[in-house]
Image (tube, grey):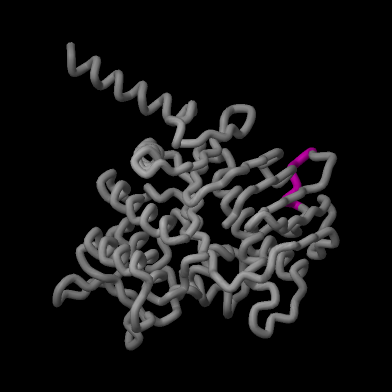
Amino acid sequence: MINQIKLDNFGPLTGINWSALGKINLIIGGNGSGKTFLLKAIYSSLRTLEDTKRGNEQRSASEILADKLYWTFQAEKIGDLVSKGAQAPLSSVLTVDNLDFSYSFGKDTSKQISSLENQVPPRASNSVFLPAKEVLSLHQVILKSREQDKVFGFDDTYFDLAKALRISPSKGKNYKEFAQSRTKLEEILGGVVAYDEASGRWLFVKGRHKFPIGVTAEGIKKIAILDTLLGNRYLDTQSVVLIDEPESALHPTAIAQLLDIVAMLAERGIQFFMASHSYFVVKKLFLIAQERGWSIPVISATDSDWVCDDLKHGMPDNPIIAESIRLYQQEVELALQ
């Protein structure tokens, strides 16, 4: 499990030290505050650990990381990721099971990272990034743009996810909690999403009826992706799942149901990092923390800094929370007039 994240001069993240991380971890802030950037920074380190020494991989961790940063952030050179005006280099420390994976580089770095230290053993499990935008209807486009055309556009979070979705479903007994989660996910969907080998398209199957994925609701596609990755065993009990805006295209009831499933999977071992600006997400996770007695660490963007809280101890003091409460109070006042 990831225990701590420390970032300095990493794009908009000039100084973050987020420790004592838990099964579920939440990043909140307004648009442009750096939430997605933080998720991608975590993802780049994780994927480097997972690719290093896996199978016949011959590249060094430094080479894998440089490539991952290049294709995830799609900068002309990775030195462009150093915060504008920073006098010190970019540095990142990801602590996994109390062991550090750390690196640093300056603004003139092109593709070679000379300063990297790794104490973390190679990981056999897979992490995955679920972006805010849907992927299923663009699945073949993403694969073609990266595998054939090799052009910027869809970054590595999309490309890695598209490759993971290409894995065929596995038969046989799954983890109990994974099987239960899949059942609940399919209840929310009202059907199943499946890849049709003959047509090379994703379909939504409801009873005897099949619908093209392009005409299926955005929220259904997002839930279907998680269901698919549990079904094809890409995810296991040591996986890390990063979700950007879990609330995207979901109504409040579905958000609550999805987060209950996240809690079930977290209890079995999957660690989650989520970035959100939804009051519904924060409130539901607060209730999960209270009901289960869990620590759910929160890091929130303010006008001047990033502040760490824990939903186990209460709702955080954050502009998103304050504005939601203000609107609720205004609604109550109008109703009482």
Dividing the picture into quarters, in which one does residue 327 lie?
Answer: top left
Judge left or right: residue 299 versus residue 122: left
- Main secondary structure along the magenta-highlighted residues: loop
Q: What stretch is highlighted in magenta?
A: 80-85
Asked if one can make out residue 30 in the rendered structure from this viewpoint, the answer is: no
How far across and down, in percent of the image, does residue 75 sit? 69, 57
Q: Which residue is drawn at 83% across and 51% down?
A: 106
Q: Nearer the viewer, residue 2 or 278?
A: 2
**As drawn, 316 above or below 59:** above
Horizontal relation, residue 274 to residue 69: left or right? left
| In the image, residue 177 lies in the stretch drawn in magenta | no
Quarter of the image holding residue 101? Answer: bottom right
Quadrant where the C terminus sits is top left
When asked about the image quadrant of residue 15, the answer is top right
State the image coordinates of residue 185 (x, y, percent, origin top left). Answer: 29, 62
- The image position of residue 210, as x and y in percent, is 21, 75
**For the point 75% across and 56% down, which residue is it?**
102
**Between 75 and 100, which is closer to the camera in this rendering?**
100
Image: 149 above or below 14: below
- Residue 202 in picture, x, y percent from top left: 33, 75
Q: Quadrant of the N terminus?
A: bottom right
